[in-house]
Image (cartoon, helix red, strand yellow):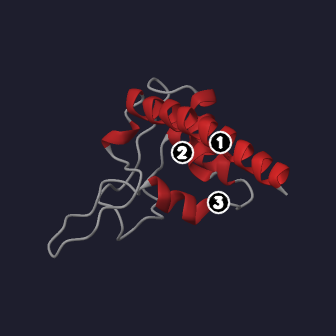
């Protein structure tokens, strides 16, 4: 019984040790790529006369797309190429009407890493 508890504790410690650096790395990637200019990690608490955020928080993106077939590919395409005015799926929740493409700021490979992290 003690061995099992010890193994579980060690496994949890090893998992916790790997979560922090990945989060730090992805947060740096998002900052360096300009993502955090419009996106936040969690939605802001609405105030009485609050202005809508420019883009959805990553937790909202995850809630909407996690587990959907093709979601990762679709979101990577939006990060790289942008969204058009007809792709307005956040109407009433964000102030921006389109997301600009970001092929200069972030590579497709890094965009995929970031989207995978958001949807985890």
Q: Secondary structure at mark 2?
A: helix
Q: Secondary structure at mark 1?
A: helix
What residue is shown at x 48% (from left), y 62% (from top)? 60
Q: Position of residue 64 (x, y in %)?
A: 56, 65
> Which residue is under mark 1?
13
Distance, label 3 to label 1, CA atoms, is 26 Å
Which one is in front in this view, the residue at disc 3 or the one at disc 1?
1
Circle on res. 66: 3
Q: Residues within 10 Å of mark 2 (few under 14, many from 20)?
A: some
Q: Secondary structure at mark 3?
A: loop
Q: Is residue 94 above or below residue 3?
A: below
Report the front residue among 80 and 50: 50
For the N terminus, which image quadrant? bottom right
N-terminal of the pair, mark 2 or mark 1, is: 1
Circle on res. 93: none
What residue is shown at x 56% (from left), y 58% (from top)? 62
29 left or right of 72 in image: left
> Which residue is under mark 2?
78
Contact between labelled residues 1 and 2, with CB atoms less than 8 Å apart: no
Which one is in front in this view, the residue at disc 3 or the one at disc 2?
3
77 left or right of 27 in image: right
Q: Residue most toward the front?
A: 2
N-terminal of the pair, mark 3 or mark 1, is: 1
Report the front residue among 26 and 9: 9
Q: Position of residue 104 (x, y in %)?
A: 46, 23
């Amino acid at each position: 019984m003690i061995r099992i508890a010890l193994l579980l504790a060690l496994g949890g410690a090893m998992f916790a040790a790997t979560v922090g650096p990945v989060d730090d790395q992805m947060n740096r990637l998002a900052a360096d790529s300009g993502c955090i200019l419009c996106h936040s990690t969690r939605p802001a608490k609405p105030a009485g006369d609050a202005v809508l955020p420019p883009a959805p928080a990553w937790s909202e993106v995850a809630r909407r797309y996690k587990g959907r077939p093709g979601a990762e590919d679709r979101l990577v395409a939006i990060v790289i190429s942008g969204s058009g005015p007809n792709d307005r799926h956040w109407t009433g929740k964000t102030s921006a009407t389109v997301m600009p493409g970001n092929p200069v700021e972030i590579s497709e490979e890094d965009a995929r890493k970031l989207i995978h992290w958001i949807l985890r």
